[in-house]
Amino acid sequence: MFKKYYLFPGFIILGILLLYFVGMNSMALTDPDEVFYAETAREMLAHKSFLVPLIFEKPQFEKPPLFYWLILLSFKAFGIGTFAARFVTAFCGVIGLLGTYLFVKKVLNKEISLLSTLILAASALYFGMSRSAITDIAFSVMVIFTLYAFYTWYKFRKNIFLVLFAIFSALAVLAKGPAGIIIPLFVILLFLLLSKDRRTLKSFIFNRWWWLFLFLALPWYIYVSLKYGKNFMCEFFIHNNWHRILYAEHRGIDRWHFYPCVMLWGIFPWTLYLLMVGRHFKKYKTDYLFLFCWIGTVFFMFQCAHSKLASYILPLFPAVAISLGISLSSLKRKYKRLMVIGILYILSGIGLLFPAHFFAGEYPDLYLSVMSSACVLALTLIISGVFLVSNRLRGALFTTFAGFVLFMMVLSFGVPQKLETAFCDKDMVKIISEYNYSNRPVVCSKMYVRGVYFYTRNPVLVIDSSPKPFWSEHPLKIISSDTEIIEFFTDKDLVLCVLDEGDLRRINKIFKEKRINTIISQNFDRSVIASQRR
């Protein structure tokens, strides 16, 4: 299908470089997660605490150190800032794409490898996580490479791939914990059991390279266990791993339909192509079985857990992309399903403009950015649909990929100031200076406390209705009762606050007659106020 189209690989490479590395500074690091990882890496670097992650100058055990190490190295190379933090995840994302291309090319063929890489590169969730300075893409790439290494060993029976399996699984464990080995093992065991391949199962379980895995994965855990004992064991293994299965960190999204919806929009703009999955099943039966075991295992493991986030199921998207690559390869005749997909794309493109116009109309400051991005995306879907109706799959794939690149470029460089100050705390540097408020405590809702601290270095304290507002313990003063709030504010002429809508109403109600709460900036749910005594 693509043999004569010699520019195709170069087209993908150029698009990937534009997608993943251009415009990373268009928005500052966001609350609450990007600043959490960046702040931890900065404190580790400042205190030379290379084995123990720190937050607010105290040890924290929410995640193992691998991702912090990567950001720390990037800070050393590029300086502390947005680009350095996001470079790590963009680099991980690109390495994941390169690994996908090489893996699929080796075990299948070049055409499928190109298609799979193109689809994965322009998938909304994989791309989004690669442009966010959080640990999930680094963890996912290690899990993905672990599974690639196993299946390549399964196909070719060369021990070098078991060595790679041990290395990547150990790195996955150092990126996020036990899930780094549990996920691959469940996928592999399910695949081998369904394949009824007991000989391979025995050979895999009793291979000597497990010692290499233990040698690489365990030293850090042994060190912090010996140094911090029960505190580490309870916080990391019980609270941050086991309790996430039993209890919902974000109760609003603990719903059965959450992950099915994430899968559908996470693979966008290729969602409708899922209707093609299953072509060439007889020819690639074993490969499909492995990929379906991969997808099903990751999906159901996290579906059963009560703590849910979109990024948790990121490791299954390469398997979805490869399944699509197989299904779309070597199309030599017309398929009615392609025509149906084309019509749906055309209708989606036309229909997209109406909600975009309505949303943009609600926020005039965002109108130009939202509508320009929506128009690019709508035009992409319509042109892709026309190609599909005309049975020109290659043109549709090129248009979809190029349109996604252009859409993200417009979105990246069209970020208005209003949007940045709704999700970032970089503006607090200027406000602190204007109010001569250096080294004085800033009162923050829990969503903003990490960002304010990261950008200003001012002392921070948390206002919340709960005395324990965070999933993991934070070494910060928390004022939760009205009495505590009044006690803190009473003797202060000026207090700067960064509050969500609920906390702002509470402050206004408590100090209605006693203080003047002036709004300095207010964007969406985030408000910066200056609270002064009357």
Image (spheres, rainbow, N blue to C red):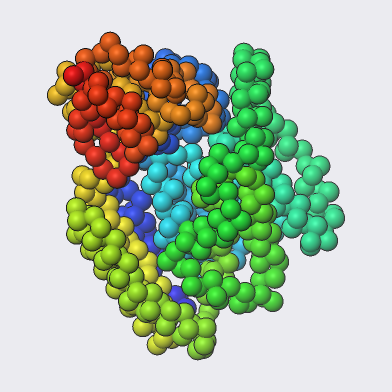
Vertically, is 451 above or below 278?
A: above
- Image-quadrant location for residue 48: top left
**288 sits to left or right of 115:** right
Closest to the observer: 502 or 220? 502
Closest to the observer: 374 or 140? 374
Residue at 26% x, 13% y: name it: 492
Vertically, is 89 above or below 107?
A: above
Closest to the observer: 6 or 444? 444
Residue at 29% x, 30% y: name it: 508
Vertically, is 532 above or below 344?
A: above
Residue at 62% x, 18% y: name it: 231
Q: Is residue 306 visible?
A: yes
Query: Which percent across, then down, holds residue 413?
Result: 23, 52
The extreme front residue here reads 513
Vertically, is 250 above or below 333?
A: above
- Image-quadrant location for residue 455: top left
Residue at 29% x, 61% y: name it: 359
Q: Quadrant of the C terminus?
A: top left
**237 sits to left or right of 444:** right
Q: How many marks?
A: 0
Query: Which percent across, then down, holds residue 475?
Result: 47, 18
Closest to the observer: 429 or 317? 429
The extreme top residue here reads 491
**208 sits to left or right of 442:** right
